[in-house]
Image (spheres, rainbow, N blue to C red):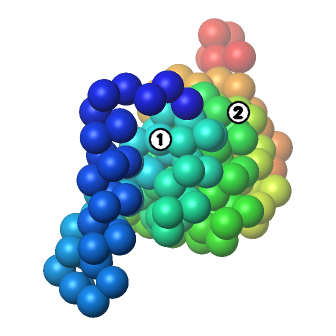
Amino acid sequence: MIMTPKRLLAFTVALWISILAVDHDRFREKANSIIQAEFCQASFKGDISAMKLWLAFGAKPNNMTLNWAASSRNPDALRLLLDHGADVNSTIKFGTTPLHSAAGSGYAENVRLLLQSGANINARDDIGTPLDCALENHQTEVVYILKQAGAKAEREIVFTEFTF
């Protein structure tokens, strides 16, 4: 993990607030907010060492961190969150699941990992199913993986000679 000045400041503030927050809920809430924000950012970047650091400081794997990790290029970040109890079928705004995020981003390895971890292959959000997200974003490898696993699309799938 690269310790940028901003990250060092956030780390230092979170540390001091957590030390001072022994009896002060307001300070504890602020420390948790800083820790969670940094943890989300590390999840999005797929920065394993930073994620482990923030987990040690009490960060909680939640729906946002899992969706961001699913959209990252690092399946190990996703695996770390799942190993720490993140709900594979958690949702964020509009009902989006981590599988929707991974499918729309085209990260086939993340899609496979989520399916192996019990992700609902036909979960619906405002766009449709994870297969719909992959189709919408022209993620042909992910479309193939999802179809092979039995995914259903909300929309009609039209295959052309250029689809695969």
Front residue of 46 and 137: 46
Considering only order in the chain, which callout, 2 or 1, is on the residue closer to the N terminus?
A: 1
Task: Tell me if mark 2 has few (under 14), some (14-19) or many (20+) residues whose alpha carbon lies within 10 angstroms of its own.
Answer: many
- Amino acid marked by disc 1: Ala
| Residue 13 x, y percent position in the rendering | 27, 53
Q: Which residue is mark 1?
A: 42
Q: Which residue is located at x 68 percent, y 11 percent?
A: 161
Front residue of 139 and 75: 75
Image quadrant where one finds the C terminus: top right
Q: Is residue 161 visible?
A: yes
Q: Which residue is located at x 28 percent, y 33 percent?
A: 6
Q: Residue furthest top?
A: 162
- Amino acid marked by disc 2: Ala
Label 2 sits on a secondary structure element that is: helix
| Residue 157 x, y percent position in the rendering | 57, 37
Distance from Cα at disc 1 to Cα at disc 2: 21 Å
Q: Which residue is mark 2?
A: 108
